[in-house]
Structure formats: structure tokens, C-alpha cells
Image: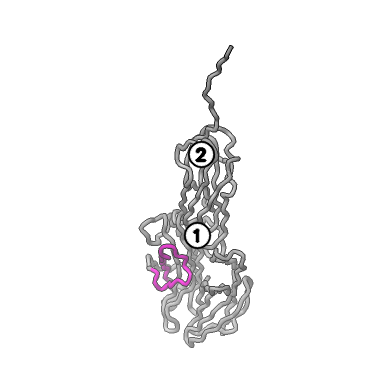
Amino acid sequence: MKRHVFRITPLIILATCPAAPAETAEYTNFIRQFQTTSGVQWDASVAANGEQVSQLGVDKGGSRFELWTFLTNSPTTSYLLDTAFVGTYIPLAAVTIHSEDPYGPIPRTRADRMFSVDIAVNGLLNGANDPVSAKSVNLMRHVQSYGSGGTGVNLDRSQATLLTQASVAQNGSRTLTYALTSVPGADRTKVRGEECFAVFSLADYQAPVAQIDSSYIQIWPVADGSLAGLTQAQLIRFALPQLTITLNDLYPSSTTYVQAYQGNPQLGVTGTTLPGSVLVLNESVPQSRVLTIKDYDAVFDHEGGWTIELLTVTPFGTDRLAYLSFEIDRTIKVNGTLTTHE
């Protein structure tokens, strides 16, 4: 009876609860093995990386393996990271998704960015007497929205929409590239959800249809923001007013700040960062914030026209979320007359 070797890729899961940044997230990892014919289920606790031999042999109808991680802090949250199916006549397949974001645990990207999927299939047979299930596999693409403000936690993936499917009858690797996501939503810049790519075997006399391998990518919305407290073309005579910065849907890995420079608005200019305006995120889901800035007059050390910009830096580059220009004139003019008396 065949036994399977678990190979675990490193797991680096970030806490999803910004309300308790001082609490350390604790995760428990395990592999779950399902025996197709007997229905037996077996769980094996695993470290964050490495390999080990399964305690159960591979079932004659095949065995499905699932890699799970559980956030043990309150509230308890589970994440299915990967799946694989092993059987006598089952071909091998690997699905790998790439984006411009190097984040490790779960591939992710932004709604306006491209991504690609590598599909590798091996072990397909083509002999006249070979089982039909050994000659081809099915590649399926599903999409699912998280809804407004959703993060995908405890998502019911059985509700995903099948977007495309195709039969693969040749061994080898192929790459599929997508300019934009197909996660549904009226405002294409604000969609949030996931796309899943999975390779399925065909049913035969021993085993039912089974998912050989799969991977999914999370899609997060494009950020937006605004500046309040100053108005376009405002004339500043004395101290600068308090600024309120509203930030929506900041990318999970981003640095956002307000900068100032003399002159009219120009893209690509490096200015002076306003104190108290820098927000650095290293999260697993998008964030929204409201910041208040005051006592920043020292940055504006010359009279004349100035521009302030709200910028966010992500793995995809630097984006300007908002800007405005105003005039500073603190010169005091005294009107009077000089007379003499004899």
C-alpha cells in the first residue's frame, strides 16, 4: 500500500484583526487525509515547513490531502491553504499563481492589476488500453465575490461561480495570463474576492472525480482617499489649519503619507513628508483609516504657492490619492503716514 510524503511549504500568516495589534497571532497547522473508498479521515499535525510520511497508505480509490492552518487566538479562524489528490491512475498536476505582490501565504493582487497561472500536468497516458481517467484532466476556473467590506474569512466556496473549464490531454506546462480579474462587481476598481484555478481528475471504476491540485488568488480593491481642512486655492495668512485624512481600502502591504512641495501639482515630485502623516501597513486584508494632522507649519518655510499630495506606495508602484494647492502669504503690511510738527 502506497504512502504519501507530505511536503509543506513555509507558512507566514499575518493577523487579520487590526483592533489588537499588540497580540501575537498563534497558528496551528495540520494535514487532513481523506480515504475515498473507506471514508476514513486522519489528521496529522505539522510544522510550518518540512516533510513527513503519512501514517495511512493511499486508498485504492485515491486519497485527498488538505493543508489547513488555524488561528488559535480568539476568534478562531481556519484557512485552507492547499489540496492534493493521490491515486493509482491519477495524473499529477500543480497549479501556481503569480502576481506582482511577493506576499507568501496566499497569492493576492489588486483589482486593476494582472496575474498569471502556471499549470503543470504530468503522468497522462495515451495508450489504447489505458483508462479514460488516465488520459486527460479538467481545468476549472471559479470566481467569487467577498461582498462589500468582505475579507473571505469562513467563506463558503461551494457558492463560487464556474467561469471556464477546459480539458487538458497533454503533459507539460502552460501559463495563462489575465490582464484583470473577473470577480463580479459593478465598480471594477472596488471588487474584492478570489479566483480559484483547480485541476480535476476524471471518474473511473475505482475513484470519483477528484481535485488533484488547486490554488486561489485574493483580489483587493483600489484605495481612495481625501484631504479636508484646506481648500483648493486657499490663501493662508497665519497658522495652517488641522488636516483630516480619510483613507479607504488601503492595500494590505502599503505605505501612505502626505507630502508637500512648492509650486503647482506635478506627478513624480519628491517633497517633504508632513509629520504625523505616515501610515505603514503589513496586514492580510485591506484597511481604512482616518488620520488627523496638526502642528506641521514648519514644513512650509517660504511664501508663495504650495501643493500637498496624499500618496500610497504598494507593490504595484506609487499612486496619488488626492492633492490640492494653496497660497501662503504671511507678510504683514502696515498702512500709515509720517508727519512732522514744528
Image position of 116 with respect to 331: above or below: below
Residue under label 1: 286
Pinpoint residue 199: horizontal percent, then vertical percent: 45, 70
- Please give the name of the residue rendered at 51% of the width and 86% of the height, measured from the top-left corner: 40
For disc 1, the neighbor class at 10 Å (few under 14, some 14 to 19, many from 20) is many
Pinpoint residue 300: horizontal percent, then vertical percent: 57, 38
Q: Secondary structure at mark 2?
A: strand
Q: Which residues are magenta?
A: 138-160
Residue under label 2: 307
Q: Amino acid at mark 2?
A: Thr
Image position of 177 with respect to 231: above or below: below
Quadrant that contains the C terminus: top right
In front of the other: label 1 or label 2? 2
Q: Amino acid at mark 1?
A: Pro
Residue 69 in sight in this render: no
Q: In the figure, is residue 206 to the left or right of 1?
A: left
Which one is in front, 63 or 81?
A: 81
Image position of 84 with respect to 58: above or below: above
Find the residue positioned furthest to the bottom.
38
Which one is in front, 140 or 257?
A: 257
Q: Is residue 140 magenta?
A: yes
Q: Please tell me which of labels 1 and 2 falls first in the chain.
A: 1
Q: Tell me whether circle 1 and circle 2 mark residues in contact (CB < 8 Å).
A: no
